[in-house]
Image (cartoon, rainbow, N blue to C red):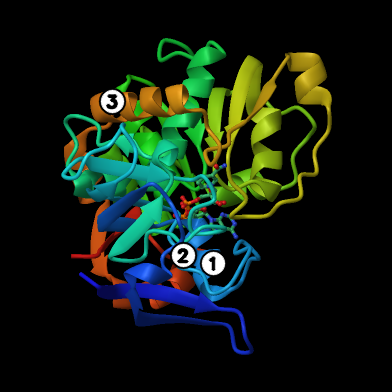
């Protein structure tokens, strides 16, 4: 395939994201050439494709912070033509041409073998969002939050990270409370395993520095006022895995949950996650995410639909996960 389709972002005025033919020699250097089968749409891709957030570091850029596909050429002993591989993070789609393209050329060390038990499509149903959800679950576990304790909270529950965190935690036996600004998504959230659906407004209403102790832990994908509303409700010794800022980057809170209840605020970062932890998170996803629930929370679209969906994800209107089919 000497030329292929890719979404290409240019920074001029106006900022554009256009589908065009790209040739192999336009791809950046790297040891492995991958025929991309699927990419996915994450919040950060929404920022990159629309230009609403300055996530792209050089132009022109092919966005797409994750992809799954088949190796076509490899100068690395770790991969051979025909191997199925997955990539999330490492600045791909931000600093290095990404997955919203039928071909990608990348560093070998950025790739992981497709986890056993998952199809290429399912790996992108999970994508960066689901990978991050699992890193959040692992962080809570490592801080002693277990299914036998009090209930746990997931914020932004109808979004990508939230949906997968909810489904995994419920499967692991936690009693999960799903916080959402979209009460119409209650049936969806219950189908993923939510024991209770909490209106987002409960968390953003003015709160005392310490409210009644309720949650053993939380996965927060929203940040801002929502995270500020979570912290006073976490029980003694509990932990909050904070990974997102879809609702704002500023955190106005008090130190009392930390000082008087020993609450832990755990930062979760997926882009530079070390390889060993990456492999462990993928293994856990293959084991602990019910695939029927994953399949039910995914919509599959083609590349041409991405610019419109990028607007929708920033408006908080996308439910679950979007897989982009590059076939
Ligand atoms: P989605 O848009 O799919 O989900 C975000 C959810 O947050 C929405 O579905 C909505 O949930 C809620 N939300 C959206 N806007 C607002 C708002 N203004 N106020 C309050 N809540 C809002 O995005 P993703 O799941 O892909 O990503 C979630 C967050 O995690 C993003 O901030 C993203 O950048 C971050 N992220 C961070 C990573 C890391 O490495 N730290 C990796 C991956 C993602 P509902 O409708 O249920 O209320």
**Residue 73 as seen in the image, left or right of residue 168:** left
Please give the label number shown on residue 63.
Answer: 2
Estimate the x, y position of residue 208 in percent, counting from the top left.
Answer: 78, 35
Residue located beneath label 3 in the image: 288
Which tag is nearer the camera, tag 1 or tag 3?
Answer: 1
Estimate the x, y position of residue 148 in percent, counting from the top left.
Answer: 41, 10
The answer, for residue 240, to whether it is visible in the render is yes
Please give the name of the residue rendered at 42% of the width and 55% of the height, measured from the top-left corner. 183
Q: Using the rendered view, name the quadrant where residue 185 is placed.
A: bottom left
Please give the name of the residue rendered at 38% of the width and 46% of the height, measured from the top-left corner. 31
> Is residue 239 or residue 7 the one in the foreground?
7
Please give the label number shown on residue 217.
Answer: none
Q: Using the rendered view, name the quadrant where residue 171 is placed.
A: top left
CB atoms of marks 1 and 2 within 8 Å:
yes
Estimate the x, y position of residue 138 in percent, counting from the top left.
Answer: 47, 22
| Crowd band around label 3 with a 10 angstrom C-alpha radius: few (<14), some (14–19), many (20+) | some
Disc 2: residue Cβ within 8 A of ligand 1's nearest atom: no
Give the mark nearer the N terminus: 1 vs 3. Answer: 1
Spatial CA span between label 1 and label 3: 31 Å
Residue located beneath label 1 in the image: 48
């Amino acid at each position: 395939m000497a030329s292929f389709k890719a979404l290409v972002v240019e920074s001029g005025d106006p900022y554009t994201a256009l589908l065009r033919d790209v040739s192999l020699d336009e791809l950046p250097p790297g040891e492995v050439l991958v025929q991309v089968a699927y990419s996915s749409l994450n919040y950060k891709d929404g920022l990159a494709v629309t230009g609403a957030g300055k996530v792209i570091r050089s132009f022109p850029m092919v966005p797409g912070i994750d992809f799954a596909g088949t190796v076509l050429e490899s100068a690395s002993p770790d991969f051979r033509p025909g191997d199925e591989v997955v990539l999330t993070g490492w600045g791909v789609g931000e600093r290095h041409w990404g997955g919203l393209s039928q071909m990608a050329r990348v560093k070998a060390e950025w790739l992981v073998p497709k986890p056993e038990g998952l199809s290429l499509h399912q790996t992108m149903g999970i994508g960066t969002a689901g990978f991050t959800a699992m890193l959040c679950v692992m962080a809570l576990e490592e801080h002693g939050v277990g299914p036998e304790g009090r209930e746990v909270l997931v914020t932004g529950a109808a979004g990508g990270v939230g949906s997968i965190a909810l489904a995994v935690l419920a499967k692991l036996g936690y009693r999960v409370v799903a916080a959402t600004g979209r009460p119409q998504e209650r049936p969806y959230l219950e189908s993923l395993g939510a024991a209770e659906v909490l209106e987002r407004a409960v968390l953003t209403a003015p709160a005392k520095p310490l409210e009644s102790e309720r949650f053993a832990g939380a996965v927060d994908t929203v940040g801002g006022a929502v995270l500020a509303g979570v912290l006073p409700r976490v029980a003694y010794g509990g932990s909050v895995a904070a990974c997102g800022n879809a609702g704002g980057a500023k955190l106005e809170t008090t130190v009392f949950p930390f000082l008087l209840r020993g609450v832990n605020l755990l930062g979760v970062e997926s882009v530079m996650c070390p390889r060993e932890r990456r492999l462990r998170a993928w293994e856990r996803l293959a084991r602990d995410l019910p695939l029927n629930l994953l399949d039910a929370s995914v919509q599959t679209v083609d590349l041409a639909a991405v610019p419109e969906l990028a607007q929708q994800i920033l408006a908080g209107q996308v439910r679950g996960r979007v897989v982009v089919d590059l076939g």
